[in-house]
Image (cartoon, coloured by chain):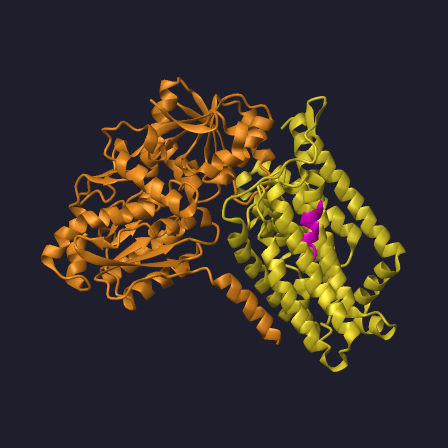
Amino acid sequence: MKSLSLVLAVALAGSLAIAAAPAEAQIKVGYTLSATGPAAALGGPQKNAVALLPSEIAGQKVEYIVLDDATDGTKAVANARKMITEDKIDVLMGSSVAPTSFPLIDIAAENKVPLIVITASAATVVPVDDKKRWAFKVVQHDSLMAQAVVEHMKKAGVKTVGFIGFNDAYGDGWYTEFEKLATPAGIKIVAREAYARADTSVTGQTLKLIAANPQVILIAASGTPAVLPQKALKERGYKGQIYQTHGISTPAFIQLGGKDVEGTIFPAGPIVMADQLDDANPIKAPALDFIKRYTEMYGQPPAAFAAHSLDATRLLAAAIPEALKKAKPGTPEFRVALRDALEGAKDVVLLHGIANMSPSDHNGFDERARVMVVIKDGKWQLLK
Amino acid sequence: MDATIALFLVQDGILNGAIYALLAVALVLVFAVTRVILIPQGEFVAYGALTLAALEAGIVPGTVWLLAGLAPVAAALEFWRQRHGLDARRSGRIVLVDLVLPGALLSLAVALAPTKPAFPVAVLLTLALVAPLGPLLYRVAFQPLADAPVLVLLIVAVGVHLALTGLGLVFFGAEGMRTSPLSASMFSLGDLVVTGQSLAVVATSGALLLALWLFFDRTLIGKALRASAVNRIGARLVGIPTAMSGRLAFLMAAGIGAFSGILIGPVTTIYYDTGFLVGLKGFVAAIVGGLVSYPITVAAALVVGLVEAFASFGASAFKEVIVFMIILPVLLWRSLRGAPVEDED
């Protein structure tokens, strides 16, 4: 009786992880995503997007296995090992944040399984070494996004900037990349503050930022937690331009921020602005199609991160025909062929950019993988 | 740092401190009466704020389904516990309290939510939905173990916390929400801008703390709670039903938690997992108060709030480290000063 109640409570909470799959699939794709835990806002939509993936690629049936790693690196490792040894997956995808993605690199290399990383951290694929030759990434490097921000600031004649970011890998990564580019561009960072995702108040940090009197402020945070410092800055009467990062490309940011996030400028993947892209842009059609199908299925438009899990499979689809020429799915030879084919993939249209892989670049994105966006009248607008 | 900044930080510190004080008092209350270290205290805060946010958005809050799931389990347990002395009157009571009442709340919430009820109605409904979760959780998870060692109860509390966080994600989604403020007014005192909301938070917290003090000092039930806190067996001998005390303590804890959530909902963004950290800071204050003293606990909560505000100004990257370090000297001092206390088990 005593333990029954506990078991019940745990069972209720634990029934979140799902794995859906038809039998007799030929190619097996294993996703480990952070659908619960602190990164649930990223992993949740990414898991949703898996349901929209094609069931057949190049004439082969594809089976998708999705496991939840609860934003826990240890769990991600266990998921990856389980899918590699028990399900004999041909390719591993994941995970939603840096701490859950890094351990996957070792496992992928050890078992010679190609890995497609769906988090921003550049260090997951740079530099390409013995281990990372198995890892590919379909998310823009922070440096690519930071470059866009610095260019915009430079054009606007900004000389001083205040920085506030997450007290974690995301905030630190952005600071490093931003500082590297800003200093040569003659932009001085006059204040650097940090806050945590779960913080209920950023008054102290805000006061310090304002006291340093920067022309503009860059907030490096993701999802709805990025609203908190911006609201606090507005409350304290900060009038300068506020920049955010691509982490805020989710409709929830505007819903929560309302008036206070009006005028925010941020870099984003092209899918965010799909409807405003030139018709000639190859990303436009597939992006609009994805948004339409996602909205039909879940009743709300996808956050930009949702497209990363789709992109991983789009990249895979580009490599499969080549790999099939050399070996049969489910064999070690196929996985090696797949890795080689991924490395040779050229001009692959993903929803977040156009990838040109090479032995030294396992991300392959260029400036086509970003657009600058401004929030105007509660909507995203392409900044040209 | 000039005087204006210091004033702003003090204001921020008191605002947060008031919430921590409420949570810390609830923690002390629950621990004193039931020996449960209520890790899920923070979850009640998140559930309170998010339930209110859902009602404001015209959505039926997931809290309703938790209530609907827990109540029948609690009823079944109650039937089992009383199986030897069950008569029509007792059965009727169980059915009324555990099935009819939650059912009525459920249908009320389902009926009212889509109409986007007026603010006072939404607040009352939120309290009515979240507060009963306390006693229900107590009866389902803790009461069957009421005589177990503190450590076992702590482990169960961690389990309940994890379950509630997971359910919170299912009910409310991963994105944060804010609720509309109790008061949108602003006052200027020199350079200092005071929002009506922050005054409302501090004033209502203060009033609630005062009411709690009067309750414990002046009412029979309050005295009974204190008696069961001092000595469970003794309280039983003089006819105080200790299981009832436990339920009452949990009801108050959940109610206070939900109320705190309603208070801070407009000031900050609340996520399904925000509660844990907020609760932990209340816990720091409760530890400083030795899990017994209410006045010391309240004072400590204000100190925690102030330290947090100044730390976030001075060294934002180390804010949490600094806040949680407060606990170290206190523990050291307590262990040096106090004689080792034998566990009662």
Residue B248 at x, y = what percent? 76, 61
Dividing the picture into quadrants, the one containing residue A155 is top left
Q: How many marks?
A: 0
Residue pictured at 25% horizontal, 28% vertical: A279
x and y, in percent, of residue B51 in the image: 61, 48
Main SS category, magenta section: helix
Which residue appears farthest toward the left when viewing the image?
A: A325
User: In the picture, which quadrant includes the N terminus of chain B?
Assistant: top right
Part of the protein shown in magenta = B124-133
B219 horizontally vs A293: left or right: right
In the rendered structure, the colour chosen for chain A is orange
In the rendered image, the residue lying farthest to the top is A157
Q: Nearer the viewer, residue B264 or B295?
A: B264
Asked if B220 appears above or below A139 in the picture, the reply is below
Instruction: Give the vertical position of A43 relative to A369 (above or below).
Output: below
* Residue B277: in magenta span: no
Percent x, y of residue B336? 71, 61
Q: Is residue A90 above or below residue A120?
A: below
Tell me the residue at 41%/50% (across/down): A43
The reply to whether residue A94 is in sight is yes
Residue for point 52% across, 43% down? A196
Q: In the drawing, does residue B164 fall left or right of residue B76?
A: left
Q: Is residue A364 left or right of residue B199?
A: left
The residue nearer to you, when weighing B21 against A186, is B21
Q: Is residue B337 visible?
A: no
Which of B218/B88 is in front?
B88
Q: Is residue B293 above or below residue A267?
A: below
Residue A238, how many percent across, how many down?
A: 55, 23
Q: Quadrant of the C terminus of chain B?
A: bottom right
Chain B tint as drawn: yellow
